[in-house]
Amino acid sequence: MTETATLNADQDIADALCAQVGRAYAERTPLRIVGANTRGFYGLPVDGEPLEMAGHTGIVSYDPIELVVTVRAGTRISDLEDRLAENHQMLAFEPPRFGPASTIGGAVATGLSGPRRPWAGAVRDFVLGTRVINQEGKLLRFGGEVMKNVAGYDMSRLMVGAQGTLGVLTDISFKVLPQPAASHSLKLSLPLDAALNKLAELGRKPLPITAAAWHAGELFLRLEGGKSSVNATRERLGGEEISADLWRELRDLEHAFFTQNNDKALWRLSLPPNTPALPLDIAERDIFYDWAGSQRFIKTSLDADTLRKACQQAGGHATCYTPAALGGAQAPFTPLNPVVEKYHRQLKAQLDGHGIFNPGRLYAAF
């Protein structure tokens, strides 16, 4: 039976949002799409008229049996997760919050996922459909509320990580999953090379690991699943039990690694699985490995070209989380090669011909 959030009907401001976008299109007025602004650090600053999404809130529909929820973009992640938890369900991609007011629309727009991502999937893997305001101020629907309805599904995925540069997300339908029956977090004292080898070894076995990180000589693991499986793996690995708060702190960049001694720029490196330590002059204390090593946060004064060249040679890329005004890179995202840039420009021209949606958010040129 579908639950409908009738009490939140008065928080549907889609008509007002459409009207503002329509005026901006007619007047060629740039818009800065903003929810709670907890992800303002991610990308370039936007100079435009604010399009406030925080008032567009509420769960439109939720079917726990079908594992589908549709929610308005301005809804707080915490409110949505609390509602899902009532039925022992969750957003499996563990969206980072970066603050208590963080919205689900911002999570989708940035496309960021938490520690469970390599084992459960990324944001776009759980987006079933969206409602989007196009450049002319029209509200369009893409995709559906079940996986088999694939009409327009690629368009919905395209909105994930676009940072609002292609349209305005108003509603998103997600596939949700049951919460694990058991969970256990532990740590093992291991140097970096041994930890990376251990992670590669564990990755080849059918173990209930849903998070793996390393920092300052300690390997952290989270086990989730059936009680018997978790208990058996727990006994096999040994180690010291730790609080599950570690994964929240890592997810939201609240761990002491991120909050202390911030005299250097913070970078996020995205690399292929089983990539060894990169040949960079960075102290181990200034690196936090996540996603079993595929995601690495580093603090460094190295220039952007040096970092990005090392990542590119390893098959990955680097993103700067520190704004340029605070000592970060002038271009937070890896510059596009000419072929990819050509397609980006063509897509932007078709979906936002007048450049009104978050201009310059991803790349200064468009």
Image: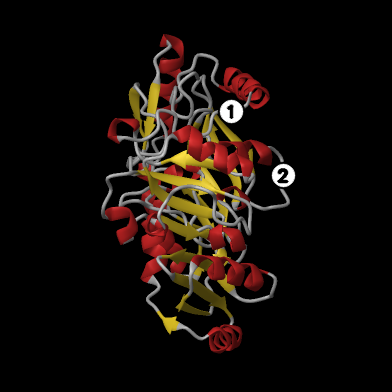
On the image, the x and y values in percent for residue 34 come to 36, 35
Of tags 1 and 2, the one toward the viewer is 1
Q: Secondary structure at mark 1?
A: loop
Q: Residue at x 40, y 28 (%)?
A: 330
Spot the residue most to the top: 27
Sequence-earlier tag: 1 or 2: 2
On the image, the x and y values in percent for residue 221 come to 50, 73
Foreground of the two, 80 or 49: 49
Residue 255's place in the image compared with 111, above or below, is below
Residue 317 visible in rendering: yes
Residue 35's place in the image compared with 138, above or below, is below
Q: Quadrant of residue 19?
A: top left
Q: Residue at x 61, y 84 (%)?
A: 229
Foreground of the two, 233 or 102: 233
On the image, the x and y values in percent for residue 280 come to 49, 47
Q: Amino acid at mark 2?
A: Val
On the image, the x and y values in percent for residue 279 come to 53, 49
Q: Residue at x 40, y 55 (%)?
A: 283
Q: Which residue is mark 1?
A: 336
Q: Amino acid at mark 1?
A: Leu
Q: Residue at x 52, y 45 (%)?
A: 172
Q: Secondary structure at mark 2?
A: loop
Q: Which residue is mark 2?
A: 150
Q: Is residue 160 left or right of residue 332?
A: right
Residue 363's place in the image compared with 192, above or below, is above
- Tell me the crowding category of disc 2: few under 14, some 14 to 19, or many 20 or more residues within 10 angstroms, Cα based: some
Q: Is residue 44 left or right of residue 309?
A: left
Quadrant the N terminus occupies: bottom right
Residue 72 visible in rendering: no
